[in-house]
Amino acid sequence: MNTLLPGLRAPGCRTPTQRISWLASAPLEELTGHLVEQVLATRAVAAELGAECASQACLPEGEVLASPFGMRAVVMGAREGVVAVHHETRAIIPVDPEFVDDAVIDPMHGVWDGGELRLGKYQSFFQDEPFIRWNPNHSAKWTPHEMLHRASGFFARDTMTKWEFYIGSRLNEIAPVALWYGADEFLRLERSATDVVNDTPRLQAPRELCRWIYDDEDLLRERARREAHFVRESAAHFEAEMDAIRSEIADGQRIVVPHPRLNSSSDALAYVVGHYNRVVDALRHTDAYALVPPGVQSTDVREYTSRIESIFDGLFFADLAWSPVDVDEKVMQRDRWDISLRAERLTGPDVDWPRLGQALAGTTLSGDIGAPAAMVPGILASGRLGGAAMAGDWPREELRQLEEGLTDVLPVSCENGALDAASVRDVQARGPVAERARRTVSGAAAAVVDIELLLLRQRDRRCDMIERLAEYSPGLPATGRIAIHSQVLSADVGRQALEAFMQVEAPDLPPGIELEAGTLHLAAAGYFDELRISIVEPGIADRLWGAGSEPGHGVEVRERTLSPAEFRDRVAEVLQPIGSGEDTPVEEVFLRLQAGALVAWIPGIR
């Protein structure tokens, strides 16, 4: 469908500068009236356009519709062919120390860490990339911010100075940052008047919480009156940044604009340190930028300054036309640009650029792209399944990195074949990979994932129960670091997980922690309607068991091998919720599972 997303009206203003100035200074009552008029007009097309734009850009629909101006930012990026690539299936490109200062190299770049694929701070975002990275561990608020970055294009030239690159880098940031702290907060999700603004952003953006789409007009108008100041603050911040940048261009001196949460000048300097050498080398010695679509790359800072002002003006005031046919062609252009950039970053001068160009001009990509064979899988594993057509088994390469992360955190479930990486990738929900994997399984497989989650949650968390147990056992350290993993589950889910886990081998523990073959030590406590489980370090457990066999230490160890059925009954008995009053004691048990059976426990210590 061809759709028009209506812009805001600025009375008597004819230029971007005039309109932005009006936005920054208009009386709130007047501004509220114009904002409500625009939002009501937008609602007429929001549902249909939001669904189509989300599908086109590979985004959850709620992230497109989270706020009126956030939606406009997403549409501005998407209509330029920008789509989201999946962070966990986009093969990580190692940092080349030749082009990056040691001060900005992160040793954790590209490492799976507790279910999160880490990126270095200065490697997680490149202004000169065609797509946005959809990272499930980051807030949904990043989506419109990143889409506006791509709509802003970038500045680069092979003869540019570091000062020019600094100016261009700062320009690239100001519209997305002004959106983040200002206009994207206007009518975002379901905020009430008492919410604290700009606290930790909500991880998810469920469509049902996009209230600006369906609230009664009176409610919408009242909320708009309370939140119109966000839009005005957005424009005021943009004006202050643009004034500073124009002065920097004229005088050659850095200017810092005061802001309670950021320093855009120092951020731009850090970007220069992390990327200047890389960009200049690529421009001078490769053809990596030959496939950049027209109008995306700017080579003059003054021209780029005018362009950024036009982009910000369009975010509020343009009537944004959406045409799927035009968008499809632009996505294909960006697919080819993306592959060429990945080839340059992975192999540099070793690429046969003429042959790569011929390959990208075709309709299907194969291994014959003019790059060293060992590098081809990483180049083509771009996180864009469904994007540039690929021959052979390249979709398998897309999943390899994600499979590594799943195996790292859910080894038992992966070994049992219970998890499918493609299904986990397709879960459009944010959060740790293990929790998203949990959504793809049910029954016994889900219970096994639940118990494996014990290995991921809150390492080194204090466990009051183990500390109290230690008080009965001289020589045991009464420290908060005894329980190395802990998780709170509902009592029913906890029992199911323990039962299911008895049917599989004990999982691998983190480096340095070893279990006897087939043995698992758990501390479990029934807290009314919850079950709290901790996996206990074997050395601590052995000392506790030993203390229980010595007279006078107040620890009673009951040893008996139970069948699975008896074990279930025992867990149900010990961990049954026993009351709701504050003074009601909680039941606790220290369990020793061996070869799939409960062989010993320490009950009832309070």
Image (spheres, helix red, strand yellow):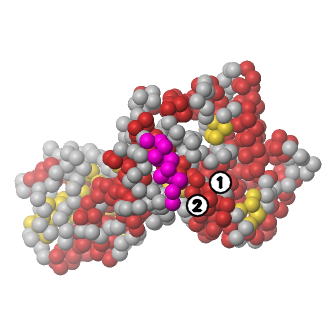
In the image, taking residue 592 as reference, residue 500 lies left or right, namely right
* Crowd tier of the residue under label 2, counting other residues whose Cα lies within 10 Å: few below 14, some 14–19, many 20 or above: many
Look at label 2 and name its amino acid.
Ala
How would you classify the magenta stretch by its main secondary structure? helix
Please state, as top left, top right, bottom left or bottom right, where the N terminus lies in the image. bottom right
- Disc 1 from disc 2: Cα separation: 10 Å
Q: Which residue position is annotated with label 2? A: 57
Q: Secondary structure at mark 2?
A: helix
* Residue 338 in view of the camera: no
Q: Is residue 382 above or below residue 354?
A: below
Residue under the image location 16 percent in, 51 percent down: 514
Q: Give coordinates of residue 268: x percent, y percent.
A: 59, 32
Q: Give coordinates of residue 428: x percent, y percent.
A: 49, 64
The image quarter containing residue 560 is bottom left
Look at label 1 and name its amino acid.
Glu
Q: Which residue position is annotated with label 1? A: 80
**Between marks 1 and 2 in the image, the one whose residue lies nearer the viewer:** 1
The image quarter containing residue 24 is top right
Residue under the image location 55 percent in, 45 percent down: 129
Q: Is residue 82 above or below residue 503?
A: above
In the image, taking residue 72 as reference, residue 584 lies left or right, namely left
Of 501 and 422, nearer the camera is 422
The answer to whether residue 356 is magenta is yes
Magenta region? 352-363
Residue under the image location 68 percent in, 45 percent down: 295
In the image, taking residue 590 as reference, residue 100 lies left or right, namely right
Q: Give coordinates of residue 487: x percent, y percent.
A: 34, 59
